[in-house]
Image (tube, helix red, strand yellow):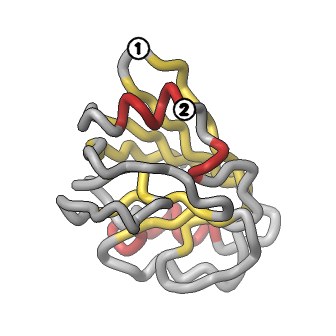
Amino acid sequence: MECAIAASGHENIRATHATTLELTTEGGLTPAGDCIIGVGASHACATLPTQMRSLARSATAQIGLELSVASVDTVTVTGRGDPDLRWSDRTSMVVRTSTFIDDRTLMVGADHAAADLPRELTDVLATGAPLSARLWVRP
């Protein structure tokens, strides 16, 4: 199952966090938000399709987030689901390299955090460029 997500870059995007990356529906960002790579997102965990949420609540689920920005190669972040995923936060989605789970956790065991993204991608996002993401969940 797939879901398209639109967001925007922001001048304060730093993408330096070593264990997480985040998309938020909020329109602004302070420099302290070092894991945030997109603002004004069209979805948060709670607004993702119910069927997708059900699929993600499996220890064997594979979850991917493809990040696309004009003139930069698409980057795919992959991780896994977990029976304890809640996807209940109405503001954000957090990709975690760890196994920590809260209401904002989109996936755990991810192969990329914000700091792992290509600098070319994050530099373009820091100009405010549009970000297109495709979230997929496979059982």
Residue lying at 20% horizontally and 61% vertically, measured from the top left: 28
Residue lying at 55% horizontally and 53% vertically, measured from the top left: 16
Query: Tag 1's secondary structure?
Result: loop
Q: Locate the C terminus by quadrant.
A: bottom right
Q: 3 above or below 81? A: above
Q: Camera-side residue: 137 or 129?
A: 129
Q: Amino acid at mark 1?
A: Ser
Q: 94 above or below 114? A: below
Left or right: 37 in relation to 110: left
Q: 22 above or below 104? A: above
Give coordinates of residue 79: x percent, y percent: 72, 55
Q: Quadrant of residue 56?
A: bottom right
Dot 2 or dot 1, earlier in sequence? 1
Crowding around mark 1 (Cα neighbors within 10 Å: few <14, some 14 to 19, many 20+) is few
Residue beneath label 1, please? 71
Residue lying at 38% horizontally and 69% vertically, measured from the top left: 92
Q: Quadrant of residue 116?
A: top right
Q: Amino acid at mark 2?
A: Arg
- Of circles 2 and 1, the one toward us is 2
Give coordinates of residue 74: x percent, y percent: 54, 25
Query: Tag 2's secondary structure?
Result: helix
Give coordinates of residue 17: x percent, y percent: 58, 60
Left or right: 128 in relation to 135: left
Left or right: 78 in relation to 4: right
Residue beneath label 2, please? 119
Q: Camera-side residue: 16 or 104?
A: 16
Q: CA distance from mark 2 to mark 1?
A: 13 Å
Residue lying at 39% horizontally and 63% vertically, measured from the top left: 48
Give coordinates of residue 87: x percent, y percent: 48, 76
